[in-house]
Image (cartoon, grey):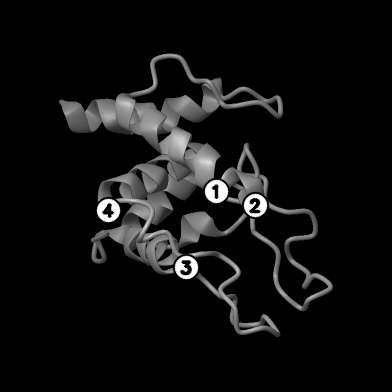
Amino acid sequence: MTKWIWLLVLLVVPAFAVASGGSRVIEGMPADLIEGQRIYEQYCAACHGLQGEGAANWQKPDEKGEMPAPPHDESGHTWRHSDAMLFRMIAEGWRHPFNKSDRLTMPAFRDILTDEEIRAVIDYLRTFWTGEQRLYQQTESQDMPSN
């Protein structure tokens, strides 16, 4: 029964998201998604946007030759990654392969966030995606569960 409620929440929650630039207050959101939202807003939104919209011109290198933060909403590609890959990117950080610098343009959060908090962020990211994107991502994750 809980699995069906969770699936229903993942499919319905985005429809209730606030379209303004403010926090996405969603009435009735489960506690783990509220925690994921809180963590996302504290650690991720500065670069990826409060609504998951990403940095402006995210598909073109900036003046340093680095790719800006991509969107996590339906316009980006986050939904194409398995849970395991998303977990690794958040925990270990990420350097886009086409960056001209060697630095991690996305910092590692393993020393800041627990595994459970990272999973809560991944669960919250799903609220940005369409139903079709969530189903695709779920299929990608079946053989590669997060840590």
- Check disc 1 and report its element: helix, strand or loop: loop
Give the residue number, with chain letter if any, for mark 3. Answer: 93
Instruction: Please state which of residues 55 and 38 is positioned toward the viewer in this rendering.
Output: 38
Location of mark 1 (residue): 44
Residue type (three-letter) at the residue carrying disc 2: Cys
Disc 3/disc 2 C-alpha distance (Å): 13 Å
Image marks 4 and 2: residues in contact by CB distance under 8 Å: no
Q: Quadrant of residue 124?
A: top left
Residue 5 drawn above or below residue 62 = above
Quick one: SS at disc 4?
A: helix
Q: How many residues crowd around disc 2 within 10 Å: few (fewer than 14), some, or many (20 or more)? A: some
Amino acid at pointer 1: Cys
Point out which mark residue 47 bears: 2
> How far across and how far down the image is residue 33, in percent?
37, 32
Please state which of residues 136 and 74 is positioned toward the viewer in this rendering: 74
Spatial separation of the CA atoms under disc 1 and disc 2: 6 Å
| Residue located beneath label 4 in the image | 115
Looking at this view, name the residue that lies furthest to the left.
1
Q: Are marks 1 and 2 in contact (CB under 8 Å)?
A: yes
**Quadrant location, the N terminus:** top left
What residue is rendered at 20% in x and 33% in y? 3
User: Disc 3 residue type?
Assistant: Gly
